[in-house]
Image: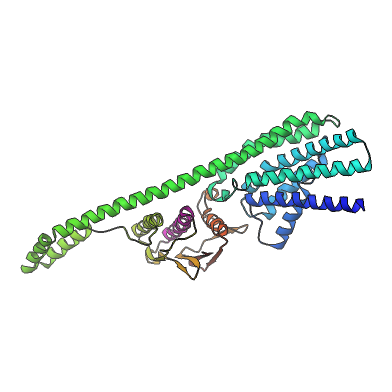
Amino acid sequence: MYDIIYNLTTLILYAVTSYYFYKVISNFSSVKDNKYAKFTSILGAYLIPNVIIYTSDIVNVFYTMIGFILIMVVFYKSSYIKNISAVMIFYPIVVSINLMANDFCAKVYIYLGETLWMDYFAQTLEMCIISFSWFLIYHFSKDKLSNIGRYIDIKTWIMIDIICLAPFISIITTIINTPLGKEYQAYPIAIACIITSLSMIFLIEYIVKNVKNRLENQNLKLEYSYYRELEENQKNVRKLHHDMNNHLSVIYSFLEYDNLEGAKDYFNELSDKFNVSNRVFCKNSIVNAVINSKYNLAIQNQIDCFFNIDIDEILPLEDIDLCSIFSNTLDNAIEASLKLSDISQRKISLKARCNKGYFSYSISNNYNGVIKFKSGKYNSTKLDANMHGFGIENIDDIVKKYSGTLNITYTECEFNLLAIIKI
């Protein structure tokens, strides 16, 4: 009877630890969309945080580390560098907590009496400590690790990995070189590794906030520039209205003397002088500023644009997310269009609207037929591809944030992206 209760308790505590460990890693990176990846990631979440760690134990330490790395690299979606960062941050926490919990509970077992009941109690206490630790880590990190994929680039992940390398190596060498019976000697390093890893989560949150603020400032600058230009256009229109009689008199004089060329030239001069470059695509001022910026850039590069935008109602999307969708897709479309030597083929069609409780966003553009697709991701065709190609990945992260769907299709000459989010 007691064996059944103990085994049931063990199973429950293992499941709790696995659940919170899995949630922590899922906040960091997403599992690939296939049953094998999901099964393996769940299995890894069961085995990795529950592993028993002793000092002078090479086998469990290295098997856990190698297994963790393989699962993150093979079965998770994000870039290899980012997934390795998850190992660098959380592996020292795993082995440090498990080492100290095992040693502490072993001492409790010896102190209270080496009986079967004390053995059950000590093992249950160890699992409780580990479960509660991951419960706390999850609630500590869940908000800090949200949307990190959209705001941290490869260079920053490499920097984070380099910083984590010292505690990562320190805890491994400490566990291997500390003799049995002197586990207390490893405590300072283990505690330092846990603090360092948790501090890295604070650092990641700080970086994300800075990048997000920078993007918001860029959008606000675009909005400010848009309103300045709009105000200037309105001044020009008022000037035109004020001098209209004079301008009409000049044009009439040209026509009266059958000087059609002079009338045309004067009219064209007026058109250029009072040309309004800004358009009102939607009532969201920040989004409108972003679209205007990209639209003007496209027109300057002789790209034929068709924009049909109807998103006047309030959306449950953050402005920075909405702007990211427009700016990333339009940047990609403009970049692809500029690679076409035949100017007549440079075309971008964008449609965005709210209808029947859904926000739909569709953009299509012609391209040169070259697409790099690797490991389930679209890669940049730029020479420095390692520093680019995150636009679609960012859009995918945004759409998933709002539980939407993203569909990408392409032919030999046309690329299409469709995002749908329930509002």
Residue 335: within the magenta? Answer: yes
- Identify the residue at horizontal 9%, vertical 62% (top origin): 250
Q: Main secondary structure of the magenta part?
A: helix
Q: Which residues are magenta?
A: 318-340
Nearest the eye: 130 or 292:
130
Give the residue furthest to the right.
115
Note whether residue 54 is visible.
no
Q: Position of residue 121 (x, y in %)?
A: 86, 43
Does residue 358 lie above or below 295 as drawn? below
Question: On the image, which quarter does residue 282 sit in?
Answer: bottom left
Q: Position of residue 200 (x, y in %)?
A: 62, 39
Q: Relative to 349, is 186 on the left or the right?
A: right
Q: Position of residue 322 (x, y in %)?
A: 47, 57
Does residue 104 lie above or below 238 as drawn? above
Note whether residue 148 is visible.
yes
Residue 160: within the magenta? Answer: no
Q: Relative to 165, is 4 on the left or the right?
A: right
What count of labels does the image hold? Answer: 0
Question: On the image, which quarter does residue 290 sit in?
Answer: bottom left
Q: Relative to 198, is 290 on the left or the right?
A: left
Q: Position of residue 149 (x, y in %)?
A: 57, 50
- Identify the residue at horizontal 79%, vertical 38% (top origin): 101
- Identify the residue at horizontal 56%, vertical 50% (top origin): 147
